[in-house]
Image (cartoon, helix red, strand yellow):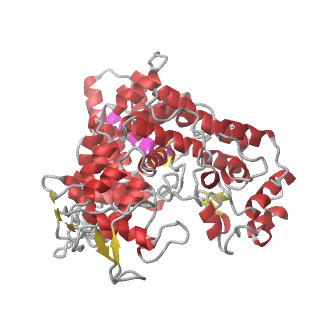
Amino acid sequence: MIPRSTVVGSLFATALLAACFSPPLHADQPLLERDVLPILTKNCMGCHGGLRKHGGLDLRTVPAMLAGGDSGPAIVAGNAAKSDLWAKIASDEMPEGDDREKLTAEEKATIKAWIDAGLPTVSALHKNVDSLLSINQQHEPQEVARTIDRHIDAFLAAAKLAPAGRSDDVEFMRRLYLDLTGRTPTAEQAIEFLESNEPNKREMLIDQLLARPEFGQQFGRTWRDWVSPPELPSDQNGGAQPYKQADEFGRWLGDKFTAGESWDKITRDVLTVQGEIKKQPQVIFFGLVGQGGKTTPDGTAQAVASLFMGVQMQCSRCHDDPYRDWSQQEHWGLAAFFGQSQGDFNKIEIGKGPSKTPGEITIPNTAFKNSGTVVQTAFLHGEAFKAGNDGDLRQPFVDWLTAQDNPYFARAFANRLWFYLFARGIVNPIDDFRELNPPSHPGLMKLLAAEFTASGYDIKHLFRCVCTSQAYQRTSWVSPGTDEQERLALTTAFGRMPLRVMTADRFLDSLKLAYGEEKEFDLRGGDRINTTGQAATVGDAYLEFHRRFGTNEEDAADFTHGIAQMLTLINHPRLLAGGKAIDEYLKRTPDAAPEQVVERLYLSTLSRRPNDDELADAMKYLRKIDDKTKAYNGVLWMLVNRSEFILVR
């Protein structure tokens, strides 16, 4: 689906300081990213971060610490003595468990000094963090990838964590296909890659997949889901929801991504569109982020801030946000750029919006404070914008947003791309950039944003850089004997790839591929009705599949599948019946030995060949059934029901 009068003079802090920051910081200044986060990552995240949050406490970000858990706030900025977190660390209650190694005196001193100092961060105190690579120019993907690894490896060394090893070809290939094309490879594609002896075959595969239409389609529907609310708005008559239009918006985005259009151009096409949805699918954006399917200036402003700038502004709609440094005035100053827009998810018109005068907007009665106040257009943390006679102020806003010196645009996209590939942003939550919620790897964040900007907002270039890195190519497996605490710490620190659950789209397309079905793959109940009670097209197989196999958008590592999903996969007659794939293969290769057919089934589902034990078990099963086609379909059913099939390693 995230802000020594100390005796810490350890080598890891010194090494990290030398590697990541320039000019050097004061040796006695405790900082979250440099000194504190590595300690918490190593010792505490296994119980208080990710899917496990004992006592409701999440220690991954400063905002989460301030919010605290079931017993209240974990820290009081500037006062360790009143901080529950420090009390538990000082008394060795944390880390929990008699078998857990406790924090050293030096580590404790670091935590205490940091809290007493007011929770200082690199982002707040040191704006000139080093990206380790020159900015203002584009670099070769391999050079960027190596620099990505320098940032990650420095953090791991500081946290005293040994990174996971390099993935084997099977794991890398399957992960890359699922990430870049939204489906598993075919058996032929798997064989071609696995048997290739090219020394740079991984880089070649990255280039090949980025050039395919499937890349655009996958990333387009990903952005469709990021834009769309959990429940789409409906019209005022029959309650119909614009699922078809939302899908068309995703395909429109996909075509842009496939064609290699830059992110600033795509953003401009979305935010300045006007007219009807029949000719311009991106019109739906404004209806999706508005209220009840209607455009609203504040709804647009909040969505633009979240999606294109990486900041949350929902609280400042009604009052100054005390945690995020956004004033109500700034919220409505941003909304004023969209005050002349009016429409719904079918059309957008300019000049008929709630703002009667271009360049200003009146805070409505639905706001908690200052209703009736007139606010002028203004850029975030910038000067007011003086509007002319033109009622459509979206163009100058996008000019500002996509400018190379804009502090929000490039980093927001880069952070989302990292989140997409690693199931966690460098800033987390991905739309909550602020001084109290700094990047876990500030130099890495600066590197990616600068490279994206210098490339002219080239989306494929940024994907190529990250996918080429060893950080992306690490295995999800951990060394034998690694305890759960260290495993979770490694995942949080990007020292191993997380186990992710296939999204519904990836799962559906991979099932269709395995069964040889190009069109609809129907896993509804026999009554063919909407089984969830949501207002949507009755009996739509695609929507029903999404409702059954949807995942947690905020955390792809959250295994959301349970009894309902398991029973569907085990018992559904459509999966038990087999598909065209087996029939077509047997027609093409009538003399294929059973071992060959089993091998092909493994390659077309798990993207690998069976090991000796798996092959022996399959052959034992096949010998019991006279109808070979039925027997092969039974093997296929077994393979798609394995957790290995639905997981992205």
Residue at the spot x=42%, y=31% of the render? 603
| Residue 95 seen anywhere in this rendered image of the structure | no
Q: Quick one: 107 or 374, which is closer to the camera?
A: 374
Q: Position of residue 3 (x, y in %)?
A: 60, 59
Residue 337, quarter of the rendered image: bottom left
Up-down: is 399 above or below 17? below
Span highlighted in magenta in the image: 621-646
Left or right, 107 with respect to 216, comes to right
Q: Quick one: 352 or 226, which is closer to the camera?
A: 352
Residue at the spot x=17%, y=70% of the render? 352
Q: Quick one: 139 or 616, which is closer to the camera?
A: 139
Residue 21, quarter of the rendered image: top right
Up-down: is 161 above or below 603? below
Q: Quick one: 523 or 214, which is closer to the camera?
A: 214
| Residue 225 seen anywhere in this rendered image of the structure | yes
Q: Position of residue 331 (x, y in %)?
A: 40, 68
Q: Is residue 626 magenta?
A: yes
Left or right, 635 with respect to 15, comes to left
Q: Is residue 112 magenta?
A: no
Q: Position of residue 466 (x, y in %)?
A: 48, 36
Q: How many marks?
A: 0
Q: Position of residue 506 (x, y in %)?
A: 37, 46
Up-down: is 399 above or below 617? below
Q: Mainly helix, strand or loop, the magenta region?
A: helix
Residue 367, quarter of the rendered image: bottom left
